[in-house]
Image: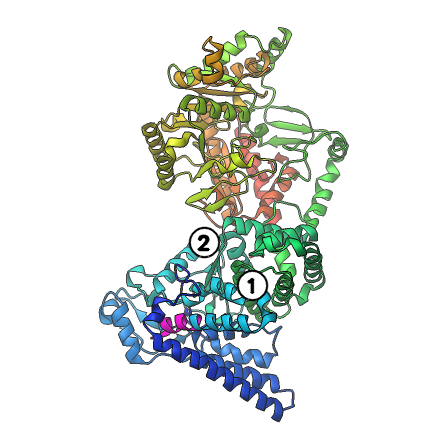
Amino acid sequence: MSESPNTGSSAEPAPAPVAEHQVPPHVLRAVPLAVVEGARVVWWAAYCLARWAMTRLVRRDDHSHEHTAALLRRCMLGLGPLYMKVGQVLGTQTGLLSPEATAEFRSFFSELPAMNERDLRRTLARGLPLPVEEAFRSFDWEPVAVGSVAQVHRAVLHDGGEVAVKVVKAGVRERLHVSAWTLGKLLATVHALVPPLRRYDLPAHFAELRPLLAGQGDMRREALRQQEVATNFRLHPFVRVPTTYDRLCGNDILVMEYVHGIRGQEPDLTGHPRPSLARRMQDAFYTMVFFHGLFHVDPHPGNVLFGPDGQIVMLDFGLVGHLTPDDRWNLGSFYYACMRGQWAVAVQRFVRTFVANPEELPAHRKPYEDELAAILRRHFEGRTSRWSTMAFFDEATRLGATCGARASTRFSLLALSLLTGEGFVSQTDPDIDLPRNARRFTDMCSPYLSEDLREKFERDIGRVTPRSMAARRGAARHLVAPTHLDRYVLPSAFPLVVARAEGARLHDLDGNTYIDLSSGYGPHMLGYAHPVVVRAVQDAVSRGAVNALANPAELRLAEAISQAFAPGSKVVFGNSGTEAVQMALRMARAYTGRQGVAKFEGHYHGFSDQGLVSSLFRHSGDAHHPRPVANSAGMHRMVVDDTLVLQYGESASLERISAHARSLACVILEPMPSALGTLDRAFLEQLRDVCARKGVLVVYDEVVTGFRVHYGGAQHLVDVRPDLTCLGKIIGGGLPCGAVAGRAGVVDIVRTSEDPFTDLEHRAFVGGTMSGNSVTAAAGAAVLGHLRAHPEIYADLDRRTDWLAGDMAAQAAALGIPFSVRALRSIFSITFDRTEPRLIRDRLAGPNFKANLALSYYMRKHGVYVPELHTMLLNAAHTDDDVQRVSEAFGLSLSEMADDGFFVA
């Protein structure tokens, strides 16, 4: 068996670009090198051109392409590391070049010249924190692999651990900077002297790429990127990234664990099927691009090893590309439109994603869009197994150039990554259908049913719910229901139409019965049609269903809520959780005299403009400093832009609050984010203290957790109280209701001063016609009274939650299925994922949405209703037997999904 260690050939980009007209510091220290490099380029270009011309005159046979490739290879070796990168890309392009020509360039993967031992010893002495003999028990002075930028040596630590020591070749860093500077000057000259090429704006394009290409010599920065990629893949079943030894790393040296494996050029030696290896590599590349936003720009065979059982070992993270959350959103939306054949939409998204200067397009917009649509259709529809990323990007780039559009840097880097990676994939499995595998990948990560799944569930579910499906079709003529029949972003292909419900059971129009795990998204804490609620509602209706007038039920409910929170707290009613949030924000602004609002990324606060900022699926900016982004069309742009978005659980958020305190009225958050099922006491305490010092109000959104996780809310579990609490769902007993509870001094800002001028200038108005109506208030007071009288309900829910969460995790683990469940006090957050997300944005980066969606329908076959891609909830009506039946349905569903190929690695 052939064996190869972890090798690599490049390093992390320099931290900052250098303007094209400036000479980098490296070049200033090595001006003679610039002269030499310029002469080298001219000499090798002339040499290659002359040799090529001679070959064309002498040879007319079929081998001329091979000789040209050999000549180019020699030229690139002479020109140095920057040009060798081109050779490595060409070494993967079996579809572009002949097999013989491609073979010439494959030598760039590992068969490159090493530096001499004297330079190696000097570099190690300068770069290691210790002498070689103190750092390592043994060190092999012969390199095990040599790349264009660095070479790799095997060593053994004093504890016996094997490591790979990656050493930057002497002089390479300077040559990279000089080569990049020289190439920039040459491109500027060509731009000035060759008018037809000006439309490509090569100098500007290269200026953006130059820091990445020239900065491939800093091993410390490469080590940081390697650690980041390793973290992203830490629980992945078939992707591995070697661990780095930070204490031994330096600017010229990277020390990492030594990995034994099969070279990327020798897939047959793995014993693993080539098609599976190729599919896994394509999936790994796509995962980096679409989900992690940190992708390998140089994934050629020299930077990949194959491990046991088809494991993919990724190496060399000097050249990496970054995609922001906005980039990934745009890229995903572009590919989604292409997969669905929505060409006009795809064109708009392509321009938004990949064109650096869209403002220069309007004069040529229509012909450009028409031709781009034709290119997309030709490549995505007509070239299936003959797909060529290079051909597609080349056509798109040429078209853009004719219309004055310049491709963005991320477009170029992504094109290079996909060009190299897909070339490698195609080498591994020449028969792979790249578009089909791409569709499989995007299908897995899409919150929509694919055609094959839709057909399957049409048979399994549609067959037993004909009346429900007919009712849905009929409703479409008169009703739009964004929460169920026409659910926003996450449409339900097979929505239930419920005829009646009681306890923990739902009965649809077709007579099917299901154990319910939605609780109506939360309000039905006691289950459906609980006797105390039914009696209270019937009595309130018989007494006139009073609204817009004070009534005893309203007073009872207000007193119950007030007593559940801090002594002396007061309550004001609304009609929903969304209204409660709107009321609280207005109260905070009126009370503080400030306008600003801060909220946390991924926390949902209803459908108001402010509440939807950076919630649901759309996030923007750096993870530690998020930017506000709309999650719906029609949101007021000024409201979005003026919202300060923070990250839950991070100290940087507290610093940002302090920095913006003079303009902030309040900070609103879910103290226990239902999307993650976590509760961070220390952070909530720190948040309260910072806001108290700065005079910023703290508003808890406990619409979901209020009276569910504890009698009162999540704040009672950590004993950290806010200034205001938003409530809804349970306090209405299953009927529409919202409320704000909090400090008397703050809530009184909505009480009349009995002076109309003072009211209009200094008081907030939050009244509603149905707020505090007697029917809703009676139902809510009955539920809270029952919960207060039966505290064992919470203990039972806690016990059942822990048991079911543990059982689900155990069943998935027994089947080897990637599954994550976070559950706390009746609230479940489940994903089919290989990661353990800490942030809500991370939870959206890589889960198998297709499996999550399908689970709902598989469970329904077994008599359990799970809301599609939504939080799962238990309530007091669920018995131990119900939970056991849910467990059995889950196990059966997982087995069926595994048999149907949902979790094939």
Residue under the point 60% across and 9% down: 546
Chief secondary structure of the magenta span? helix
| Residue nearest the observer in this picture, 682 or 873 | 682
Residue at (52, 58) in percent of width and height: 410
Q: Say if 651 sits above or below 184 in the image.
A: above
Mark 2, Cα crowd under 10 Å, few <14 / some 14-19 / many 20+, is many
Is residue 173 a member of the stretch shown in magenta?
yes
The location of residue 391, given as percent across then percent down, is: 64, 67
Q: State which tag comes first along the sequence, 2 or 1.
A: 2
Residue that carries the numbered disc 2 in the rendered image: 232
Give how far across and how far down residue 706 sits, in percent: 47, 25
Q: Which residues are magenta?
A: 170-180
Q: Point out residue 373 in the picture as x, y percentages from the top left corner.
A: 70, 57
Q: Amino acid at mark 1?
A: Ala
The one of 61 and 424 positioned closer to us in this rendering: 61
Q: Is residue 237 visible?
A: yes
| 742 in relation to 424, above or below | above
Which quarter of the rendering shows the C terminus?
bottom right
**Circle 1 sits on which residue?**
415
Kind of residue at badge 2: Asn
Element type at mark 1: helix
Q: Identify which residue, 737 or 369, lies in the foreground.
A: 369
Mark 2–mark 1 distance (CA, rounded to whole Å):
22 Å
Quarter assignment of residue 80 = bottom left
Mark 2: secondary structure: helix
| Residue lying at 40% horizontally and 75% vertically, measured from the top left | 145
